[in-house]
Image: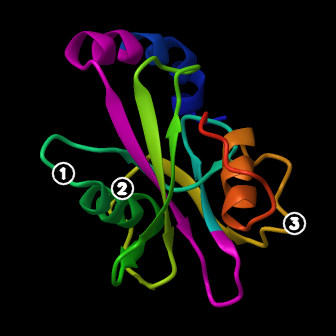
Amino acid sequence: MSWRRRIEPFTRPLFKVFSRVTRSMTLGVRGLVVNEAGWVLLVEHTYLPGWYLPGGGMERGETAEVALARELEEEAGVRVEGRPRLLSFHSNDHAFRGDHVLIYRVDQWSPCPMTSRGEIAAVQWFDPENLPDSVTPATRARILEAMGKADPDLRW
């Protein structure tokens, strides 16, 4: 287990308190990147267990699409080509009151160097019909929704 995963349970509450004091609402983006075979790209963080859709928080002054493009390059080595398609908008109140997540589908992309250092442990393609057990429940739900196999849930 990496040192980041060992300290995360202690640093997460501090981050939440800081975020609550400095922001009334947070907004994040996640990208459902799909390859020619229809497989989806997932990332595993060094500080959290499980597989996730790549993405993260929007910075002040960024549009959602700019934040998505930045996060995909940082975390997954994916350069967005063309416009991603907004799939859904979710409330993540159970984890952090006032948090929201936008899900975009990215079909047009090209590989590029990852710019994140130390945040991502692994990047891998998965068949959406055969996801690993360690995919987080919210990630699995968003993939099923995007593939038309589940009704969209407004809650993360």
Earlier sequence position, callout 2 versus callout 1: 1
Find disc 3 in the rendering and name its residue.
Answer: 130
- Helix, strand or loop at mark 3: loop
Instruction: Give the quarter of the figure containing the N terminus.
Output: top right
Residue 81 % position (x, y) = 35, 84
Q: How is the image coloured?
A: rainbow
Inspect the image, locate mark 2, and give the three-letter code of the amino acid beneath it. Ser
Residue depicted at x 21% and y 16%? 22
In this picture, is 152 found above or below 100? below
Label 1: few (<14), some (14–19) or many (≥20) C-alpha neighbours in 10 Å:
few
In this picture, is 58 found above or below 88? above
Inspect the image, locate mark 3, and give the three-letter code of the amino acid beneath it. Asn
Front-lying residue, 156 or 80 = 156
Find disc 1 in the rendering and name its residue.
Answer: 62
What's drawn in magenta, residue-wise? 15-40
Question: Disc 2 or disc 1, which is closer to the eye?
Answer: 1
Mark 2 touching mark 3, by CB under 8 A?
A: no
Inspect the image, locate mark 1, and give the three-letter code of the amino acid beneath it. Glu
Find disc 2 in the rendering and name its residue.
Answer: 116
Question: Disc 3 or disc 1, which is closer to the eye?
Answer: 1
Residue depicted at x 55% and y 42%? 46
- Helix, strand or loop at mark 1: loop
Residue 75 % position (x, y) = 43, 58
In this picture, is 124 found above or below 137? below
Label 2: few (<14), some (14–19) or many (≥20) C-alpha neighbours in 10 Å:
some
- Helix, strand or loop at mark 2: loop
> Could you tell whether 27 is left or right of 152 in the image?
left
Label 3 vs label 1: CA separation?
35 Å
Which quarter of the figure has residue 14? Answer: top left
Earlier sequence position, callout 2 versus callout 3: 2
Instruction: Give the quarter of the figure containing the C terminus.
Output: top right
Label 3: few (<14), some (14–19) or many (≥20) C-alpha neighbours in 10 Å:
few
